[in-house]
Image (cartoon, coloured by chain):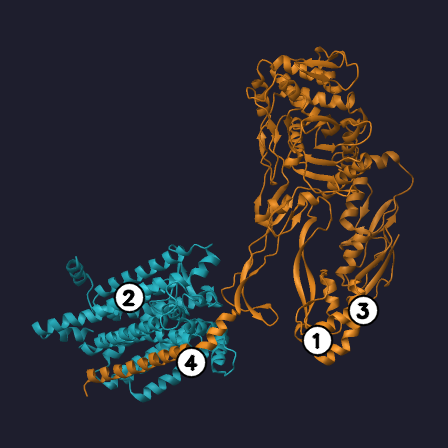
Chain colours: A cyan, B orange
Amino acid sequence: MIVALKSWIDRNLKGDPIIWGIVILLSIISILVVYSATGSLAYKFKGGNTEKYLFDHSMMVFGGLLVMWVAHKVPYKWYGLVGRLLLVISIPLLIFTYFFGTNLNEASRWINIPIINKAFQPSDIAKLGLIATLASILAKRQKSLEELKKSFLTIILVIGLICMLIGLANMSTALLLFFTCFLLMFIGRVPGKYLIMCVLFGALFISVSAMVGQRGATFFSRIENYMSKDDTLQYQVEQSYIAISTGGITGKGPGKSEQRNSLPHPYSDFIYAIIIEEYGLIGGGTVLFLYLALLYRGMRIVASSTKPFGGLLSAGLSFALVLQAMVNMGVAVGIGPVTGLPLPLLSMGGTSLLFTGFSLGIILSVSRGDHEDSVDTVVEGNRSKKVFQTA
Amino acid sequence: MNIKRSIVLRVRLAFLIVALIAGAILFKIVRLQFVEGEKWTAKAESANFKYRQVSATRGNIYAADGSLLATSLPFYRVVLDPTVAKTNVFNEGIDQLSGLLADFYKDRSKASYKKMITDAKSNGKRYLILNRKQIGYQDMQMMSTWPIFNKGRMGGGVIFEKVEKRYRPFNSLASRTVGFLNEDRYGAGIEYSFNDYLEGKNGQAMFQKIAGGYWKPVFNAEDIKPEDGYDVHTTLDVNIQDVAESALYRQLMEKDAAFGTVIVMEVATGKIKALANLQKNKNGRGYSESYNYAIGDQGLTEPGSTFKLMSMLALLEEGKVNLNDAVDTGDGVFQFYDRKMTDAKTGGYGRISVREIFEKSSNIGISKLVDQSFGHNPKKFMSYIEKAGLDKPLDFQLKGEGVPYFKKPGEKNWYGTTLPWMSIGYETKLTPLHTLTLYNAVANNGKMVKPMIVESIAKGNYVQKSFQTEVLRKSIASEKTIKQLQELLEGVVKNGTAKNVHNDQYKIAGKTGTAQKLEEGRYTRRYYTSFVGYFPADNPKYSAIVVIDSPKGFNAYGGDISAPVFKEIADKIHAQDLRLNKKTPADVYLAQQTSDFPYIQAGKVDELQLICNKFGISNHANGVNEGYVRSKSMDRSIQWQANQTESPVVPDVSGLPLRDALYVLENKGLRVIYQGKGRVKNQSISPGSPVQQNHVINLILG
C-alpha cells in the first residue's frame, strides 16, 4: 500500500518533493483554520451554514493544487513567453478594473468572470507576468552588463507602469511587488547605481498612484497610524494582540478561537492571529518555519540550476510569495502597518489561490527541469547548452 | 566571481533578510505572549467589543388611498450622566434646568428634580433616567437647547436614547385590523400576519463598550447594514372604516351590547373596505377594538337565520321547491322528534308561500322544507354546503382565522334534529367573514371571490408582491337559483324582517339573523343579531355584514338592531361615492336652479376644479399654474387666481381649509398654531411679508 502510494507519487508528482510536502501541509492547515474562522461570517451572511464556506474554500484549495500540478508538467522555458503574454493582458484588465471592477472596501480590485461567477484580481495576473518577464529579461542580459544598461530603461518603465496601475486600487500589493522586483534585480546582478535609480523611479510612480488612486487616503492614514506613538492602538491590531496573547504556547485548540468574532477578516488578513490563538506559539512557529523552508527550497533551486532564467524565475516567485507571507504575519503581530494582504496558501482568497498554485507550479517545474537536465548533462553534454541559449 | 556564484550569493543574502523578518515576527509573538501577556488577557476578559443588533426600520401600513395607518416614529428617553458636566456649568444651569423639567413633565416639583440630579451627581451615579416618559423629536430638539443639555453628550452628559415606536395617525381607527406585535413577536392583525415583510432584516455592527455601560458603534467593514421592512398596502378605505366604526359604536352604546363587528367588502373584488370590531371594555364603560370577531376563532358562532340563504340555495338547486309553493307553518310550534321548533310570531304564520317563509324568516317553514327534501339524504345537503365553499376556512390573509364547524351525517353527534336545526343556522359555526363571503357571491352573480385585505407589499415604488382577487368558486349555484336568491334577499328588505331599512334612493338586499346564544350547553335569552347584505341591489357594489352581540332591551332582533347600522353605513357610502349616485351633482344643481351662485372659497386647484366640473360650473384657470388658488366669481363663472404659494413670501391662506393652510405654510418653514374650526379667517403674519424660518404664525379659523 505504502509502496504503491510512493510509486504513484514518484510517477505523478515531479520536482522538489519537499515543496510538494510543504504546500500540501499548508493547504490542510488552511482548510482547518478557515473553517474555524468563517464561523461568524457564516452566521452573519449564510444563516449559519458554515459548510458553505468550508466547501467553497476547499474547492479553491484543490483547484489551486490542480493548477499547480498542471503548471509543473509544463517545461518552464515556456513561462518566459507566458509571462510576457500575461503582462500584456494585465494592463487593460487593470485599467478596466479600476473603472468598472467590483467594489470591496471602497477599492475596485476584482473583476467578475460571468459564467462561473467567481471574482478574480487582475493584479494577480500582473504580478505573475511581471516577475516572469523580469526574470527572462535579466537572464538574457547576464552575459554582459552593457546589454543590461541598454534595456534598463525598459525594465524600470514596465515595473513602474504595472506598480502604478495596481497601486491605484491596492497600494500594499503594488509596494510589495515593487520590492520583489527590486530584490530580483539585485539578485539578477543589476549594479548598485541602477538600483538606486530604480528606487527613485519607484518612489515617483508610487506617489503619483497614491495621489490619484482610490486608496491614497487609507494608505497615508494607515502609515500615520502605525508611525504615531499614540497609546490607542487600531481596533484590528488590538484584537489581533489579544488573539496572539491568549493563544499561549499550545493554543486554545482547533476551532476554539474566541477572537474570530471580534477580529475583522479572521479568515484572511488576520488569519495568522487565529492560527496562533488556536494552535499557539508552536503552531505559529511551525507556519513561519514552513514559509522559510519553502523559500529555502526555492533558493536551493537557484543554487542547483545551471541556467539563469530558471534560477531567477524560481527566486522571484518564491520571494514574492514568502515576502507577502512575512508582511501578512508582520501585520498580525504588529511589526508593520495594517495592509490587507492575505496570507498566501492559508487565507480564504478565492481565485487568488489558483494564481498562488500557478506560481508554485512554475517553481516546481524549474526544480524538476533541472533534475532532468543534470541527468541529461551527464549523458549528452552539449544539450543543456542548447537549452540554455534558447532560454 | 562567476555569474552563478554571484547570483547564489545574492539570493542567500536576500534569504537572510527574510529570515531576519521571520525572527522579528517570532520575537514579537513571544513578547506579546510572555511580556505583555497579562495586559492583553485582561483586555480580552473585559470584552470591550461586541456585535450588537442594529434594528431595521419597520415598514408602514397604508390604507387604499395611501393614508398612513401605522408607521414607526422615533421617540426618546431622556437620561443624564450628571458627572459629565463641569462643576461651574452644572451649578449655573441646574436651577433653570430643574425648573424646565418640572414644567415639561409636570410630575415632580422643581426642587424634587434638583434634589434628584444633585444627589445622583454626588453619589457618582452615571446613568440617571430623568423621566420614563418618552418624548417626541420636536421635544428632543427643544430640550437640546436647555442649560447643561445644550453642552451635549460629552459636555453636559445628556443622552437622548432613541426608541422606535409604532404610531397610528388615525389612533384607534381599525386598530385591531392593523394589529400589533409585542416583544415576544406575538401579536394580531396585519402587524402580526405580515410581520415577515414589515420587520425587515436587522443588521449587525461592531460596538465598543464605553464608560457607563453604553455601546458606541465602531466602524467595521464587516457590519451588516439593516434592511428596512416592506410597506403593506391594505384595501381599507379610511372614510368607510370611519363610518362603519362610528355607526357600530353608537348602536353598541345605545343597546349596551357585548360586542359588534362590521365588515364592508367590494363585491367584484373581495377587497375589504372596512373591518371594525368593538368590544365592551372590561370596566364596563365604552367600547374598543380588542378582538377580531369578524375573522377570529372567538367570532365563530351559530349564524342563525342568515344561514337560511344556504338552505334556500340547496332547496332551489335541488329543484324540489318553487318560490310560490304554499307551505303550512302551523301555529308557530312544530315538533321534530323530541325538540320543539318555534317561530318568532306567536300563533304562527299559518299557510304561507316559500317566498314569504324566507322574507318573514320562518324557522318552521325552512326546516320543514329542508327536512322533507334532504331528511332521507342529509349528505346531499352537505354537498351543497361544500359546493358553496362554506365548510373550509378561507385561507384569509390574516392569521388566526376561525375554522367552520359542521356536523357530519352518520357520525355520533348527528341526530334526527340536527338537519332541521342546521337549516336555520344552529348546530353549526361560521365566522361573520365567511357568511359575508357567501352573500357576496350571491351579489356577484354566483362567483365566489376570496376576501382580501392586503393588496400589495412594496418598498418605495418597488412592488415586492401584489395580491390579485382570487376566485374560489366560478359559480356556487345555477344562474336561475342565484337570480331567485337575489329576489328573495330584496324581498326581505321590501316586505320582510328588514322593512325598516327600505328606502327610495337605492335598493338594499339582505337577510336578518337572530340567534339565541348557546352558553354551557343551554340556549339563553341572549341573542346574536346580524344583518348581512349588499347594495345597490340592482348593480351590487358593496356587501357588508353587521353583527351585534347580546343587545339589551325588548326588540333584540337582527332587523331592529343590526339592520339600521347597515343602513347608516350604506347611506353614507352611497352619498359619498359619486359613481353610485345616479343623480349627478350637476343634475341636482341644475334641477334646483337656485338663483344663488355658489360661493367657492380658496383651496387646492385640482380639487376645486373637480367639484366645479361635477356641478357643471364653468371655471377657468387662465394660465395660473400654482397648486393653491382662490376664486373670483365673474358672470356665473369662476376665475382661479394664484395664491402666491410658490414665491418666498408669506402666502394669503384665508379661506383655505386648515389641512391646506398647514401644508402651504409649513412647506414655507413656518410653524402654525391655530384656534377654532373651519376655514382660515385670519392670519397673524400678513400676506406678502418675507418668510422667516421657524417663525410662528397664528391662524384663526371660523
Measured Cα–Cα span from mark 2 to mark 1: 63 Å
Q: Which of the labelled discs sits on residue B439, or is there none?
A: none
Q: Earlier in the sequence, mark 3 or mark 4?
A: 4
Question: What residue sits 62% from the left and 13% below the top?
Answer: B373
Q: Chain of mark 1?
A: B
- Give the distance between the C-alpha atoms of the residues marked 2 and 3, in whole angstroms: 74 Å
Q: Nearer the viewer, mark 1 or mark 4?
A: 1
Between B39 and B492, the one nearer to me in the picture: B39
Given this view, does label 2 or label 4 mark the residue nearer the observer? 4
Q: Mark 4: which secondary structure?
A: helix
Eye-nearest disc, 3 or 1? 1
B406 or B246, nearer to the observer = B406
For badge 4, the amino acid type reads Val
Question: Are the residues under badges 1 and 4 in a single subunit?
Answer: yes
The residue identified by callout 3 is B110
Report the chain holding disc 4.
B
Along the horizontal axis of the image, is B259 left or right of B428?
A: right
Three-letter residue code for mark 1: Ser
Q: Are marks 3 and 1 on the same chain?
A: yes
Name the residue carrying label 2: A25
Tell me the amino acid under the disc marked 2. Answer: Leu
Identity of the amino acid at label 3?
Answer: Lys
**According to the image, label 1 marks what residue?**
B122
Tag shown at residue B35: 4
Instruction: Say few, some or many: other residues with alpha carbon within 10 Å of mark 2 (under 14 / 14 to 19 / 20 or more).
Output: some
